[in-house]
Amino acid sequence: MSRIIGIDLGTTNSLASYWDGSKSVLIQNRFGEYLTPSAVGIASDGSIIIGKTAKERQLTESGTCVTNFKRGMGTARQYTLGDKNFTAEELSALVLKSLREDAERFLGEKIEEAVVSVPAYFADKARKATRRAGLLAGLKVERIVNEPSAAVLAFRQTHGDSDGKILVFDFGGGTLDVSLSDCFENVVEITAVSGDNRLGGTDFDMTLAKKYCENFGMPFEAQAPQIQAFILRAAERAKRVLTVSDWAEMIADCEGFKEGMRITRKDFIRMNMNNFERIGRPVKRVLQDGKIKPSDLSGVVLVGGSCKMQVVQEYVRFLLKGTKVEAFHPDTMVALGVGAYAGMKERNITSEDLILTDICPFSLGTDVINMSDHDNPLMNVIIPRNSALPTSRESIYVTSHDNQKVMNFGIYQGEDIYSKNNIKLEEFEFAVPPRPAGEEKVKLRFTYDINGILLVDAVLLSRNEERHLVLGADDDSEYTKKQIEKLKELRSAPWEAEENKFLQAYAERVYQQLNDDYAKERLSGQLLAFTGAMKTQQDVYEIQKEGKALTALLKSLEREYLSEYEIHDKYIDEFLDWYEERDIDEDEEDSQGWNPK
Ligand code: ADP
Ligand code: MG
C-alpha cells in the first residue's frame, strides 16, 4: 500500500495531512509549522522560493513574490516573477512540490499520490488545472474533493456522526464560502453553496490600514508599495491581537509611520460594518436556498483562518442565534478532512462506504436563439447549479426557421443569461431535414457526476439519429473508462418525472401557506399552466418551461411573503448592542481611540 497524503491547497495558506491508521494528522513543513503560505517568490540568485520565505522577501524587495493565484486556476492568466511568466497552475505546482518534499521529510518515505481539496464552486477547468498542477509537482491526484465536504468529514470525525443539517462557514484570506450539508447515517450531502469570492481576512487588514493612514492625513493609496506592505502587515498583526485581546495597538514602524493607533474590538466592528454586512448575505442565501431556518441546523462549523477572529465568531453566533457554532481549529479543519479522505482512499473504502453526494457548483446548458437580438444567443440551462450529483437531465430543442438544415449546439458552463459570457466547453452540429420551423426536434440529455465528466447525448427525434459526446475525460485510463460506464447507467433514471411531482407538491404547500389573495392567484395560475403541460404529456420542453417559471415564481413568493429569515442593515447596530451586552469586561472609554498617541 502506498501512502496518499491530503492537501488543502488554499488561496492564502496550504496544508498537508496524512492518515495514521486511526485519525488524520497534520504534517509539519520545514519550519515545523502546519501552514505554508501559498506564495511563490524569487530569491536574489534567481532561484524559486516558496511560502514564508517568499512572503518575507516581498517586504524588502517588492515584485519578488506572487500570491492569490488560486483565483486564476484554469485560466490563461500570466503572473510575472523576475523575467519569467507563470500560470496559476504552474505556481500551484511549485507550492504542491514544496508540500510534497516537506511530507517526504516528515514521513520519511517517498510520496507520489494525493487527495486535494478545491472550493465547491470551482469550475471544471479549475479542477483539471489542479490535477495537472499535482502532476507537475510529482503527485498523482487520486481525487479532488470539495472543501466543505472535507470540513464536514473532519467535524464528524471529532463530533461523532450525528445526523442533521450542518452549515459550513469557511472564511479565509480572500474568500468566504458558505455551504449547507445534510448528514444522515453515512451520507453527507451538500445541498447548497453560496459565498463571496471577494471577501476575506485581507479586507479587514485593509480597513485597519486605511484608518491608520487616515490618522496621519496620508492616504494609504498614495503610499509606495513597500510602505503599503509594511502597513498591511502591521494591520494583520493588530487584527490577530484583537483575536485574543479586547484591544490592540497598531504600529507600522516604517518611514513616516512611527506612531501607534489604539483600537478596541468594538471600534473594529464599526470600522468593518460593510464587511460584516457582506458576511450576512451568503449566510442568508444559503438558508433560503436550502429552505431552512437557523433553528433547523444541527451544527455550524467555522472554517478558515478568519474564523479565528473573535468578532467574526460572535457575528455568526448572532446571525444564527440559537444554533451551536463550533470553532475548533478553523484553519486546519479542511486539511484534516482531506487527510481522512486520503485514508479512505488508502484503505480502498469506496464512496459506497461513505457516500458523499456533492452538488454541481455551476449550471450546464446550451445556447438558444435570442428573438430580440440574434447575435446574442441565450443560455438555456439543462443542469441547474446546486443540482445534487450525479444527475441526468434532458431538454428538447426545435428548429427556429423554415427549411433549416443544421442545428448548432454550443455546450456551456456558467450562470450568465447570455451564452457568450459563459465558458464554452464544446460545440457540435446536427444536420436536419429541411422542414417548417419548429417541426424538427433534437433532444439533448446531459449526464454529470462529481468526477467532472459530462456525457452529452443528442437525438434527432424524426430520424432517431443519435450523437454522443464525452466531455472532460482527459485520459483514457481504466479508471476514466469505468467512470464513463457508470455515468451511462444513469441516463435512464427517471429524474424528470420525480422532480415534477415534487415541484407540484411543493407549490401546493406554498399555496396553502400564502395569506395574500393576489399572491395566491398568481401561484394558482402558474401551477395550472405547469400541471396542464404535464397532462398533455411528452413535450418535455413545455413541461420544463412551465416548471422553470413555477420555480422562479415560488422563489420570489417565498422571499416576499414567507421568508422567516431576513437580514437587514440595522442588524449591525443590533449586533453591536447584543455584543455590548454580552461583552461585560470591555473597557468603556474606547470609542475615541483613533488618534495616534
Ligand atoms: P485560505 O483558505 O484563503 O487559504 P486561511 O484559512 O489560511 O486562508 O485564512 C487566512 C486568513 O486568516 C488571513 O487573512 C489571516 O489574516 C487570517 N487569520 C489567521 N489567523 C488569524 C488570527 N489568529 N486572527 C485573525 N485572523 C487570522
Ligand atoms: Mg481555505
Image (spheres, rainbow, N blue to C red):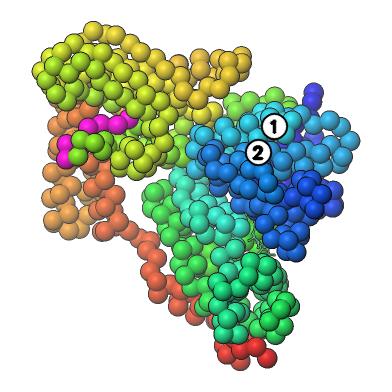
Q: Image quadrant of ligand 1?
A: bottom right
Q: Residue at x 55, y 55 (%)?
A: 175
Dividing the picture into quarters, in which one does residue 414 lie? top left
Residue 485, given in percent of the width and then of the height, sits at: 50, 14
Q: Which residues are magenta?
A: 366-372
Above-or-below relation of 548 to 30: above
Judging depth in this view, the residue of 174 and 259 nearest the camera is 259
Residue 476, given in percent of the width and then of the height, sits at: 58, 15
Q: Which residue is mark 2?
A: 90
**Mark identifier at residue 136:** 1
Left or right placement of residue 82 versus residue 118 in this view:
right
Q: CA distance from mark 2 to mark 1?
A: 8 Å
Q: Which amino acid type corresponds to the residue marked 1 in the rendered image?
A: Leu
**Would residue 540 be counted in the magenta stretch?**
no
Q: Residue at x 26, y 59 (%)?
A: 560
Dividing the picture into quarters, in which one does residue 99 lie? top right
Marks 2 & 1, CB-CB < 8 Å contact: yes
Dot 1 crowding, Cα within 10 Å, few <14, some 14–19, many 20+? some
**Mark identifier at residue 579:** none
Indicate the secondary structure of the residue bearing disc 1: helix
